Image (tube, grey):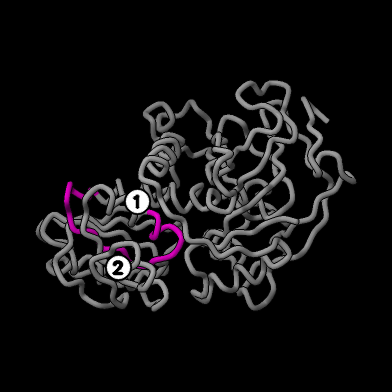
Amino acid sequence: MAGHTAGSAVAAGSGTVSGWSVHRPGPIGSGPLAAVRRPLPEPGPHDLLLDVEACGVCRTDLHLAEGDLAPRRPGTVPGHEIVGRVAATGSAVTGFRLGDRAGGAWLRDTCGACRYCRAGHENLCPASRYTGWDADGGFAEAALVPADYAYPLPDTQDATQLAPLLCAGIIGYRALRRSALPPGGRLGLYGFGASAHLAAQIALAEGATVHVLTRSEQARTLALGLGAASAGDAYDRPPEPLDAAILFAPVGDLVPVALEALDRSGTLAVAGIHLTDIPVLNYQRHLFQERNLRSVTSNTREDGREFLATAARVGIQVTVSPYPLRRAPEALADLAADRVHGAAVLIPG
């Protein structure tokens, strides 16, 4: 194996690892995931081999499994909220040592040379690549992560608590910043799953008033427990006009609903990678008075570093629903049916 190896269970095992791949994209009830056993991956010069401790289950994984995101390669292992121990390093890796805890996230690689990368907008790089879409991810016992795109993680927290931070947290943080929420402003969150329940805590810690709109009664209870000022159905009107809103639910019908709830000059940020069709908007009702509609595309590594530092400072609480790795299809089915409380996380072994 290239580079340096450690004596972890994965690195010292039979030379194969178990996991799940997207075998035949389609409705979750059709069984799009297939159990696989593959050779232990070997790190290239700039890679880390992680012995996976936990991997979060993101709605993007569900979109990939169901075919909302066209697969970029056959049989890809999904999962991009990876927490693991460094079991081996490529020959050119200098920032990590064997046994270090590291995180692998959605953004996997960029060209570093295009005008977007040079301007600090690497999330828009046309050559960007993504974990669990362009390359195998963390629904497995081991995963490769490019060292330059990995995050050092603390040993003091449970791996299941850290995993959702690596996409749900980072994307929620970028969406919060894209929403242009003013200091002390009124924020509406449409949908309240893994990402929203983390973004809400950042907003609350920064002095915002948070209103949650979601179809899940369980999620409304969680929102109020975290300090939301109100929690209603996704199509309800919040009790006061909003300065900003974030749409986490992948439901295009909610775009005009959220725009109508904005006060003058308010901004709606759409956080998902996939959204059903948006109905026709009425200029006067939905956009006039300088209301803004913004998309959110991936994240930069700086977003990740800022969020992880902010989460540590705020003492963010992560609500987790753990599943053993063997129950990955069940975790995705529960996510599709809004049965997950907080964030679903897979645990190998």
Residue closer to the observer: 252 or 158: 158
- The answer to if 187 sits in the magenta stretch is yes
Query: In the displayed structure, would residue 271 be above or below residue 4?
Result: below
Report whether 90 appears left or right of 340.
Answer: right
Residue at the disc numbered 2: 212
Q: Is residue 24 visible?
A: no
Report whether 288 appears left or right of 205.
Answer: left
Q: Quadrant of the C terminus?
A: bottom right
Question: Percent from the top left, x then y, of residue 272?
Answer: 42, 58
Question: Percent from the top left, x then y, of residue 274?
Answer: 46, 61
Question: Percent from the top left, x then y, of residue 154?
Answer: 54, 38
Residue that appears at 39% across and 66% down: 192
Determine whether the residue tagged by mark 1 lies in a helix, strand or loop: helix
Tell me the magenta residue range.
180-198
Report whether 275 appears left or right of 138.
Answer: left
Residue at the disc numbered 1: 175
Residue type, numbered disc 1: Ala
